[in-house]
Image: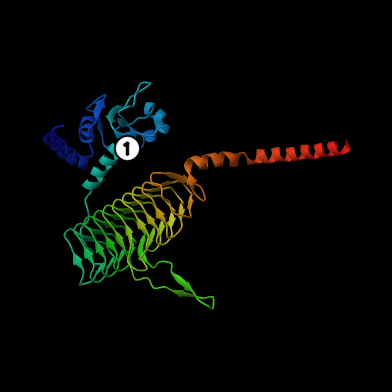
Amino acid sequence: MHKGKFNIYFIKFALNLVKMTLTAQQIANIVKGFVVGNPDVTVSDFAKIEEGKPGTLSFLSNPKYLDYIYTTQASIVLVNNDFEAQKPITATLIKVPDAYKALASLLQLVDKEKAKKSGIDKLAFVAKSAKIGKNVYVGPFAYIGENVVLNENAQIYPHAFVGDGVSIGKNSCLFSGVKLYEKTIIGDNCIIHAGTVIGSDGFGFAPMADNTYKKITQIGNVIIEDNVEIGANCTIDCATMGSSIIRKGVKIDNLVHLAHNVEIGENSVIAGQVGVAGSTKIGKNCVFAGQVGVAGHLLIADKSTFGAKSGVPSSIKKENETWMGYPVQEIRNFRRSSAVYRNLPDLQQTIQELKKEIEQLKKSIGNK
């Protein structure tokens, strides 16, 4: 499509977002898809495909939901280009290279059109030495410490704590109850969800001769680079010395703990309840499923993927491999081991039966 036409369609789309009334053809123009069905049908809301109603837009990308495409009441459904209907479908389809990505783009556009808050609430505390950029929002009961820098369009929701010397980049958002300890650095376009604590002390204690523990003072900080999203109730500890670093593009789920001096490589994804012990360095484009545990002082190669509940006790040197189990092993070996494990009761019974047969043979031979 010609760039000028695309811009025109984008403007029309943005204007219609206020009313949330969109035609199939308008949506197709934005997501660079093509319409199969009525191009003039309109939608005013989004819905899951199994809960679709007239006037809603839905999508199909997971084969598990394929049957719903034939029964959904949604007016428009985004589907992948390779989708071929096996039965009649009442909805208008928009075919795109990737339905899930197309939906994400539409939802982002809707979110951008929401009116953003700005201004400093009279019930917020902002230190005189703080530097506040344009269109910044600071909600009631938020605390902004000495020498804090809030760059333009930053959003600080109620009850957030921003400690001394913290810097928050453009368009970044701290939701209610986020706590940033001193010297934390947050890049541009970051989202930190409610209850997350960044910059708390790492777990450092030296054992003493009398069996007590002496606290090792943590004097480092945390650096969060651009385009990072961190879920609710996470904890990222400051470095003992230097910085704990979350590189650009990282996405972190809820209830994740990253210990002191940990480094997470660009565009890595970490699911809920993952724990990474101190001084471990994780490469780029890694994927951690839920409840993975990683020991300290390790190096994890780029593009490593770990299945749920895996335990990682040693460094991973091979790139682009999938790992599973405790301790982790390559996924192929894990699957073979799992098959053996499932058969252990039968194997045990077989061994017991063989033992009995051997004993009977021994007795028979002895008698002869």
Q: Residue at x 22, y 53 (%)?
A: 116
Residue labelled with disc 1: 100
Of residues 357 and 41, which is closer to you in this image? 357
Specify few, some or many for label 1: CA neighbours under 10 Å numbering under 14, 14-19, or 20 or more.
some
- Identify the image quadrant of residue 247: bottom left
Classify the position of the C terminus by image quarter. top right
Quadrant of the image occupied by residue 161: bottom left
**Percent coordinates x, y for residue 5 in the rendering:** 13, 34
Looking at the image, what colour scheme do you see?
A: rainbow
Q: Report the residue at 21% width, 69% height from top.
A: 130
Left or right relative to 176: residue 28: left
Q: Nearer the viewer, residue 33 or 237?
A: 237
Quarter of the rendering occupied by the N terminus: top left
In the image, residue 331 lies at what x, y percent? 47, 42
Depicted 305 relative to depicted 98: above or below: below
Amino acid type of the residue that numbered disc 1 sits on in the rendered structure: Tyr
Question: In the image shown, does 184 or 332 lie closer to the viewer?
Answer: 332
Q: Is residue 75 placed above or below 339 in the rendered structure? A: above
Label 1: element kind: helix
